[in-house]
Image (spheres, grey):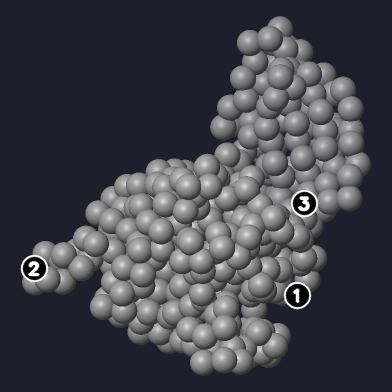
């Protein structure tokens, strides 16, 4: 029997439409079940059993009981992901499989002002699919911020600086090393919390010498007072060292001996800050476009318990920055991975320079630099029950 090509065309189309309509009428639960069966994610031909469906503000979560011996694999994860038009998180926990289907995509822009303020030393780092995420510098004192040029590193550093000043105007001291010639952070030098802005290698070295001397004094003072960690001691002051483009502070073969020595010194103090000075109230935020094993001091890497990575060129770069891959897949400015003991994809807060300058205007220095309590290290140790003599002794 002969069938014209038209017959094949129309019967094929009808079958496709039939498939589409069935597909449309399927509920999410049914589609998940079909994926389990079609990908052979079964034991004795039985797929995982649905236990509960949770409806939350930002997502709907399906909880399944996993039969013993059944392990989540890439094939089923990919097939499940294809069911949903919005982001989905698929994970297992205690013999259960969870499929969390989010209601919305992560936005491509979130204003810094939209994050509610939190007390202490917590700053907003970004928005996740489940709400805002904060970094607590008391729990995780040091942080690495990595990302290729034009993906949002400097803006995040500025957002963190703004939050720190606004939440702790009287207890914050900041040294900024802006290796982009001071172009990004030079404008904030007039704020009373900003002790110094260094814009090149020699200024960076001066800052590190100053910080190093402070750390030694502080250690002595704490030894005398038998304080082991400022966090539990009532010492309120914290000193942040923010570095934008830390890779510029790494020795390179073309440098002369003096320059190499200066760089090695800078790297040594960075390491000391993360190794011992966290307990003394010193916090390092190390920003770099492309951290490598050669330019990121090992101690900094090992002791920085928080990492934010914007887009990076390769998986290897992502592994160096945050011990995890994924940064090479980010494509949107302001989109980053925040890695601590957990991992979150975030859209970081956007803040414009002019907005930042106008809201921080009230913190501009009244006295000339170095007078009053501007950046005065003698004020370290100001606690309700610490006598003035302690402060003098420390200074
Ligand atoms: N959180 C954000 N949300 C949306 N867009 C952003 C965000 N952060 C940065 N951008 C966009 O990316 C541009 C570059 O940001 P930024 O200056 O922070 O880059 P960078 O990574 O520091 O680059 P470079 O290292 O070259 O200075 C901004 O001008 C802005 O358009």
* Dot in front, 3 or 2: 2
Between 109 and 367, the one nearer to me in the picture: 367
Residue at x 64% of width, y 57% of height: 386
Q: Secondary structure at mark 2?
A: helix
Between 229 and 42, the one nearer to me in the picture: 229
Q: Residues within 10 Å of mark 3 (few under 14, many from 20)?
A: some
Judge left or right: residue 312 versus residue 30.
Answer: left
3D distance between C-alphas at marks 1 and 3: 18 Å
Whichever of labels 3 and 2 marks the residue nearer the N terminus, that label is 3
Q: Position of residue 334 (x, y in %)?
A: 58, 68
Quarter of the figure with residue 157: bottom right
Residue labelled with disc 1:
113
Residue at x 32% of width, y 58% of height: 269
Dot 1 and dot 2 residues touching (CB under 8 Å): no
Q: Is residue 124 above or below residue 41?
A: below
Whichever of labels 1 and 2 marks the residue nearer the N terminus, that label is 1
Q: Secondary structure at mark 1?
A: helix
Q: Position of residue 60 (x, y in %)?
A: 85, 42
Q: Is residue 318 above or below residue 111?
A: above
Dot 3 and dot 2 residues touching (CB under 8 Å): no
Return the mark for residue 130: 3
Between 349 and 373, the one nearer to me in the picture: 373
């Amino acid at each position: 029997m002969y069938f014209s090509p038209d017959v094949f065309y129309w019967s094929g189309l009808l079958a496709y439409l039939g498939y589409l309509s069935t597909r449309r009428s399927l509920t999410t639960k049914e589609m998940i079940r079909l994926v389990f069966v079609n990908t052979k994610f079964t034991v004795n031909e039985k797929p995982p059993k649905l236990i509960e469906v949770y409806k939350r503000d930002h997502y709907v979560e399906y909880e399944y009981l996993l039969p013993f011996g059944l392990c989540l694999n890439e094939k089923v994860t990919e097939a499940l992901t294809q069911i949903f038009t919005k982001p989905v998180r698929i994970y297992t926990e205690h013999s259960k499989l969870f499929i969390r289907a989010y209601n919305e995509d992560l936005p491509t822009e979130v204003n810094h002002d939209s994050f509610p303020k939190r007390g202490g030393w917590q700053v907003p780092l970004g928005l996740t699919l489940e709400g805002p995420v904060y970094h607590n510098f008391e729990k995780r004192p040091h942080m690495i911020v990595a990302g290729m040029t034009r993906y949002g590193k400097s803006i995040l550093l500025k957002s963190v600086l703004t939050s720190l000043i606004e939440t702790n105007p009287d207890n914050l001291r900041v040294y900024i090393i802006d290796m982009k010639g001071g172009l990004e952070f030079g404008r904030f030098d007039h704020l009373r919390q900003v002790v110094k802005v260094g814009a090149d290698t020699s200024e960076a070295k001066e800052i590190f010498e100053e910080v190093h001397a402070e750390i030694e004094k502080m250690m002595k003072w704490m030894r005398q007072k038998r304080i082991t960690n400022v966090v539990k001691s009532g010492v309120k002051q914290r000193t942040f060292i923010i570095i934008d483009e830390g890779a510029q502070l790494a020795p390179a073969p073309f440098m002369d001996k003096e320059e190499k020595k200066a760089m090695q010194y800078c790297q040594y103090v960075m390491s000391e800050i993360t190794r011992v000075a966290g307990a003394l109230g010193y916090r390092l935020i190390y920003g770099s476009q492309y951290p490598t094993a050669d330019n990121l001091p090992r101690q900094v890497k090992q002791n920085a318990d928080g990492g934010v990575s914007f887009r990076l060129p390769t998986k290897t770069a992502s592994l160096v920055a945050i011990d995890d891959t994924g940064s090479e897949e980010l494509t949107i400015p302001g989109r980053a991975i925040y890695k601590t003991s957990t991992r979150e994809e975030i859209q970081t807060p956007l803040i414009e320079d002019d907005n930042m300058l106008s809201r921080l205007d009230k913190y501009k220095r009244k006295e000339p630099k170095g007078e009053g309590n501007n950046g005065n290290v003698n004020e370290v140790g100001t606690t309700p029950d610490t006598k003035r003599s302690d402060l003098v002794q420390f200074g």
